Image: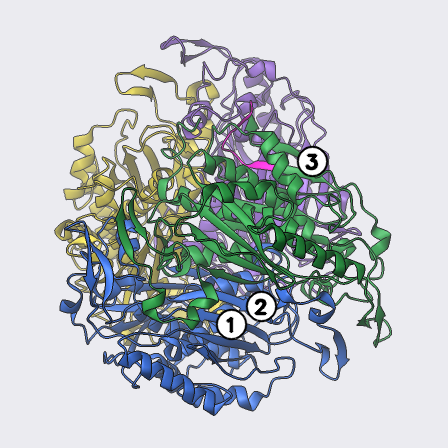
Chain colours: A yellow, B purple, C green, D blue
Amino acid sequence: MSSIWGNMLKISLFGESHGAGIGVVIDGLPSGHQLDMSEIEKMMQRRAPGKTAWSTPRQEADQVEILSGLYEGRTSGTPFAGLIRNTDTRSGDYSNLKIRPRPGHADLTGMARYQGYNDPRGGGHFSGRLTAPLTFAGAVSRQILASRNVFIAARITEIAGISDLPIDYAAPDMDLLRGFVDKPLPTVSASAAEAMQQAVLKAKAQTDSVGGVVEGVIVGLPAGLGDPIFAGIESRLASLLFSIPAVKGVEFGAGFQTSRRQGSQNNDVPVFTKNGIRMQTNNSGGADGGISNGMPIVFRVAFKPTASISKPQQTINLETGQSEELIVHGRHDPCIVPRAVPVVEAAAAIFALDLMMEAEGRLTAFADVD
Amino acid sequence: MSSIWGNMLKISLFGESHGAGIGVVIDGLPSGHQLDMSEIEKMMQRRAPGKTAWSTPRQEADQVEILSGLYEGRTSGTPFAGLIRNTDTRSGDYSNLKIRPRPGHADLTGMARYQGYNDPRGGGHFSGRLTAPLTFAGAVSRQILASRNVFIAARITEIAGISDLPIDYAAPDMDLLRGFVDKPLPTVSASAAEAMQQAVLKAKAQTDSVGGVVEGVIVGLPAGLGDPIFAGIESRLASLLFSIPAVKGVEFGAGFQTSRRQGSQNNDVPVFTKNGIRMQTNNSGGADGGISNGMPIVFRVAFKPTASISKPQQTINLETGQSEELIVHGRHDPCIVPRAVPVVEAAAAIFALDLMMEAEGRLTAFADVD
Amino acid sequence: MSSIWGNMLKISLFGESHGAGIGVVIDGLPSGHQLDMSEIEKMMQRRAPGKTAWSTPRQEADQVEILSGLYEGRTSGTPFAGLIRNTDTRSGDYSNLKIRPRPGHADLTGMARYQGYNDPRGGGHFSGRLTAPLTFAGAVSRQILASRNVFIAARITEIAGISDLPIDYAAPDMDLLRGFVDKPLPTVSASAAEAMQQAVLKAKAQTDSVGGVVEGVIVGLPAGLGDPIFAGIESRLASLLFSIPAVKGVEFGAGFQTSRRQGSQNNDVPVFTKNGIRMQTNNSGGADGGISNGMPIVFRVAFKPTASISKPQQTINLETGQSEELIVHGRHDPCIVPRAVPVVEAAAAIFALDLMMEAEGRLTAFADVD
Amino acid sequence: MSSIWGNMLKISLFGESHGAGIGVVIDGLPSGHQLDMSEIEKMMQRRAPGKTAWSTPRQEADQVEILSGLYEGRTSGTPFAGLIRNTDTRSGDYSNLKIRPRPGHADLTGMARYQGYNDPRGGGHFSGRLTAPLTFAGAVSRQILASRNVFIAARITEIAGISDLPIDYAAPDMDLLRGFVDKPLPTVSASAAEAMQQAVLKAKAQTDSVGGVVEGVIVGLPAGLGDPIFAGIESRLASLLFSIPAVKGVEFGAGFQTSRRQGSQNNDVPVFTKNGIRMQTNNSGGADGGISNGMPIVFRVAFKPTASISKPQQTINLETGQSEELIVHGRHDPCIVPRAVPVVEAAAAIFALDLMMEAEGRLTAFADVD
């Protein structure tokens, strides 16, 4: 386990925030798929830092060098490795983290896990920067899924308690879903986006941070994917979503709300349509008994507020054995949620491609892709 | 994957609700642990059907025959297999499920997954009955954990929107946690339990069902367990919790609430105590960066209302191609939540034992267990 | 790992020689395949003890009770579990093994692995009896492969240094291969079989044992199966073959002989034929670079002589700390090789089905099987 | 699976012979180990091309850039990634391989596996160059094992049918084993080495190639490591050894010879010694029932002659559909065996470290390494 995920498609992440670089090996990609590198670059840039007022000012081009697995513009099918060099590292900022661990961060647990030998600079392997190669792997997976008519989107449903409008995922407006990718704060309601932005800027001004919720959707998966018990859709997608730093909750369909309903309200009723069997509602989020039912897979991911804040906090000094005040220097996002949107999409894409390959195999499924 | 879970400890479930039997193979158990079978039996009976007014009247002794892995009363270390015979099966009740799939159930998705060849009787392999061998595996794991001073408890925090009181998991009252096991509806507040019971009985009278939330806690895990990225504590425990039928949401620590907070409120501040480094609060639920921080692991699991209800519902008839009314016969729980409590404990125990074995290995960790 | 093997198809073995029973859970079988139980029974009987002069006189019917995964005579696709009860156990025979470990057996290593808590009776989980559920899993897999025109055979090429004639696996005589299943000592040369039988009976008369070599072949796999590097055909099949007790060597194609050849002799030359591209020779054993080339997969498996012999041997007494003479009582095979033939076939079948499912997936590959 | 191997320690290889680079991600390394880079470099150079008359003249420095996992000279415990840039690539040499596949190579099977989209230059991902990052991973693993008193060596026992003298692995001469690392053709007998060298040079002069056998040994593993059935020592080590290109056979201890012996000859007799229980002989190769018995793990690996030879051969032309003569240009080893020696050591080291970590875990085993 550890930094490897997947079954037919395996993702292996490596790197530290302030080391030579970060990257990913994608093992098991179907061969012969022509990659649109500008599309991949676009998705990388949605996650990249330094783009907006609410993002960390750290400047990273996040250019991916493809080391292997691409031949004459197409996936070769052998391991596909991408490397992102770290460029704008200021490790001096972090020099005292080994003595004064940041509250809410992995400084203490990293030391416990690795007996103090892990790289503490910028959080090391625990840094949110590791979501860059994850996003890259997702961008590649998503293109292959697109050629199979599987579409993935994500939006912000909450920041700092401010909610966006609901979407009816029994019959989603595909144009609405397609439009999210072009919005800096992807929401249905423009005024909600505006209020969210104000809340983020206010937290920034207070040298504090805020959290939020990202909702993702996978449209176009056929019914019958996934496995019962331990390898159901929720189990597998949740395991990947909880891998994204700062995630503290995951729910599918109506999620926690279902626990407050009666069965007669919550059960999704199947009907015959010209597109085959569909559910009238999508409270289950597209999976029953862990298996896809042909409806959009819908899920929400709760992100805690960024742990790294410049506001003075109490922590311990491991040298003196005393509590003391800490002001975290360095460059951080007052709200990670906007940059998390493409990361959630990436996780969904990796998950969905692995799932489809289990069902369809690798020789037949993608032979005539382009 | 599929019906196998784990890394150092692997759990393989099998069986169908109305087949010959259901069971589990536990691979990788540490050897030499003396099992208290009456404790295991007690945990099995908390999950077993037919015990209370709010449980299905199906009578199943859920006696586990141990087929292998136990020698002279101790775990041998080789695969430990347990078999539960199905006894009270009334398959006639389910004869029309292949034609009229139950809304909210895996009838349709099971047919899609297995091209119609899966056993439909009582939900087959998708039945909640499969939680019996899971509970058995958890009861075994829990005893081994107990000898290592790891304690697991669970309680109901919500049924039908009725909430129990909160618990401070920064410094939990261990007597309170230990007492939950003896309550039919384990809550802090007796009046909340009474109100929950009334809500369940009311739903039963209406031939409907209600959902709820179970909160679990693992006390005593050392700091430094788990892996970064894809094998963090949340990823792995969530993948197991979502394997329990009817689960639609999982959160850790303050969970979805953290998304509505500021960093300065949400960060857990470390302090030196006579028991070593502890956090003043437990908003993270015991894991930072996917690694245990020495605080209790706390999580909540949302259960949807039981999908099988006798109240008339609409569904489709796969023979006629028309919609029609369905009344689900058979015997079902108006609320699965009380019986889910030991199942959640079992999942937590299996997870925790696997996690500890990765850190401590198998030769040294359990050599002088008893 | 441990007692679980496979990727798309997972096999989980359990049980001890003198415990309640032994069995297997097969996870991931394609659904909808109608099983011919008499064919399975026939394969089980080829492995079963007590049938010939050179087999242990232990009488075991090796009747498999199917606990799950079979519905109306077809595979349901959910975990398929089979249980074989142990009946003819005489545990008194083994009472002193914990004190006087048998040379060449797993008595000492089992104690070291499990700190002495493993079941020592009849070798416990290390017993050759565990090949019964493996054979069962292979018999099921083989039927599904047969419906895909994949054929598996095995024969004895050596016993006690007596060799059978070679077979040209570039263009094998399929009738010859099909005939092996009906021979008690499957060889090309009847006189070799006769000499082998005499050698076994002679060893038996001397209260000693002899070893031998089994050759297996998988005919009909398409080119392009397998993965490079760590998941090549040789890696995966060898890992399964070395799981069979008493196996000490595995080679593919011309195997160790290739190391004594020149490249110009050993390279298999491709040619166009009416059946597509074929190799003129089959020195590679059907795999180049770990990937199938469309030729028969050919391999040989070396079995050491049965470790349990009644001839007096030296061993240690763990109580006295002294060496002493040991006469192993109990019932054993003077040569395990004949009974190992169906076990080798079973391993090949499990391997081949897993391999095909990776390439073809599960939904499309087997949808119209019968 | 595919290009990932291991359980507690996972190795993920990537790269193609003539792409940007080749590399490895090692996931799960124990933290805190100080690496001696010059030792690693020395092992890399033993495998590197262009050093001797019998190696390919391709010049590759095989300098490894460490991308992650090393902090202040010690393993951080997080994924350890190494990258080797390809420098001396002459892809023009290989331009016709897609039309005229080389006999005995993976050209045809690679095309079948990846539908023709894989990188054909220099064999792509199937190239022996991928053994460079494998050797690197082994060099790292070996140092950690050395700090635990586990020692690994390998030598050549055969080239072109010329045999070296046997070694008694019941009580091996450790100085002899330690000396192999300094010999260009590591053998016991200097005259055997001389004869082997002549055979290789003769094959080279004939534009042909020869094969051979490498013997490896792991000294110092405690008894009780490994798992029964599918995860025994032989199963796991063989799966890794068969991953090395050109390997066609693997045997343990007396291997295929055991099949020609009687049980009374072959059984290793345990005795009490001042170093605890030892076997008087080592026919089993250090593993009984798949579990280590405390004796050296001994194995032999058969390498076929290099498939790429300049001698004219027949092959097919995929454009014309006709057979034609092929002369393989490019730069190749007339015998791969000498350069395979450190690769076999590397595989053994990766295997042994994974095995020890399963038994001892990661927190306790390596806490006070240096």
Magenta region: which residues?
Answer: C72-81
Q: Which mark is residue D300?
A: 1
For mark 2, give the secondary structure. Answer: helix
Q: Answer yes or no: do the residues labelled 1 and 2 have beta carbons within 8 Å?
A: yes
In the displayed structure, B170 sits above or below B42; it is below
Amino acid at the residue labelled 1:
Arg
At which x and y percent is residue A335?
A: 27, 52
Q: Which mark is residue C98?
A: none
Residue A104 visible? The answer is: no
Q: Name the chain under label 2.
A: D
Q: Which mark is residue C63?
A: 3
Left or right placement of residue A157 versus residue B215 in this view: left
Same-chain check, marks 1 and 2: yes
Amino acid at the residue labelled 2:
Gly
Same-chain check, marks 3 and 2: no
Per the model, the C-alpha gap separating discs 3 and 2 is: 34 Å
Per the model, the C-alpha gap separating discs 1 and 2 is: 8 Å
At which x and y percent is residue A91?
A: 28, 74
For mark 3, give the secondary structure. Answer: loop
Binning the other alpha carbons within 10 Å of mark 3 as few (below 14), some (14 to 19) or many (20 upward) gives some
Q: Which residue is disc 2 drawn over?
A: D255
Q: Answer yes or no: do the residues labelled 3 and 1 have beta carbons within 8 Å?
A: no
